[in-house]
Amino acid sequence: MYSYTRTQAADMLAISTRSLDRYVKAGKLRSKKKGKIVYIKTEDVDKMAGKHKSKPQVIVSGAPSSKENIKTVVAGWEVNNNGTLSAIYADLRREISQKDELIQNLSVRVGRAEEIAKNSVNLVEFKKSQFLLEESKWHLSKEVSELWKENNELKANLKYEKMTNIVLIFFFIILIIISAYIWFAWV
């Protein structure tokens, strides 16, 4: 069953989504895409999570096998018996596991940050698109003002032509009336 999304699977495995994508590409994890969401097979994630959750084994060579008092210097500390050495060893293991967990968390965060950076718009490209947008707005406003100017000129020409037509019609009517008066006066 494919029930985990990419981010859920990456969180369960304590890896980045980029690493998860590499596992899918390598065939270590099976995936299925539904729409725009990629789902990872549940059994594969659980199986791989079992591998990653096991504690690392630390092998110490040259550890004393007898219970005799041994004087050793560990990181500037003088140790006189095996009990103290075991306590220091346990503390160091705990500290190492904490640091490993911190490294894994930081690795996941770095992977997510890389993914966000990869999917985000480059600042130069953003500025370039903003510049082109402003330039196109400027050209558009220039074209609009030119169209308004042309529209006003056409209105003025139309008004002039209307007045000319009215004067010509008026003059023609007066000419017809005068012609009719002269015609009736002669007849």
Image (cartoon, helix red, strand yellow):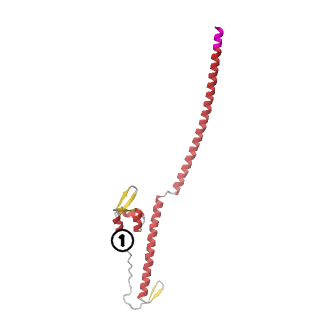
Q: Residue at x 47, y 61 (%)?
A: 116
Where in the figure is residue 154, as x and y percent of width and height? 60, 33
* Rendered view: 118 above or below 85: above
Q: Residue at x 64, y 24 (%)?
A: 167
Q: Quadrant of residue 141?
A: top right
Q: Is residue 184 magenta?
A: yes
Query: What amino acid type is highlighted by mark number 1?
Result: Lys
Q: Is residue 87 magenta?
A: no
Tell me the SS state at disc 1: helix
Instruction: Specify the quadrant that holds the C terminus.
Output: top right
Identify the residue position indicated by label 1 in the image.
Answer: 51
Q: Residue at x 42, y 81 (%)?
A: 90
User: Which residue extends farthest top?
Assistant: 187
Q: Quadrant of residue 74?
A: bottom left
65 or 185: nearer the viewer: 185
Q: Residues within 10 Å of mark 1 (few under 14, many from 20)?
A: few
Q: Residue at x 37, y 69 (%)?
A: 49
User: Which residue extends farthest bottom?
Assistant: 68
Where in the figure is residue 53, as x and y percent of width and height? 38, 72
Boundaries of the magenta span: 180-187
Where in the figure is residue 157, as x and y percent of width and height? 61, 31
Where in the figure is residue 46, as x and y percent of width and height? 35, 68
* Rendered view: 168 above or below 106: above
180 or 110: nearer the viewer: 180
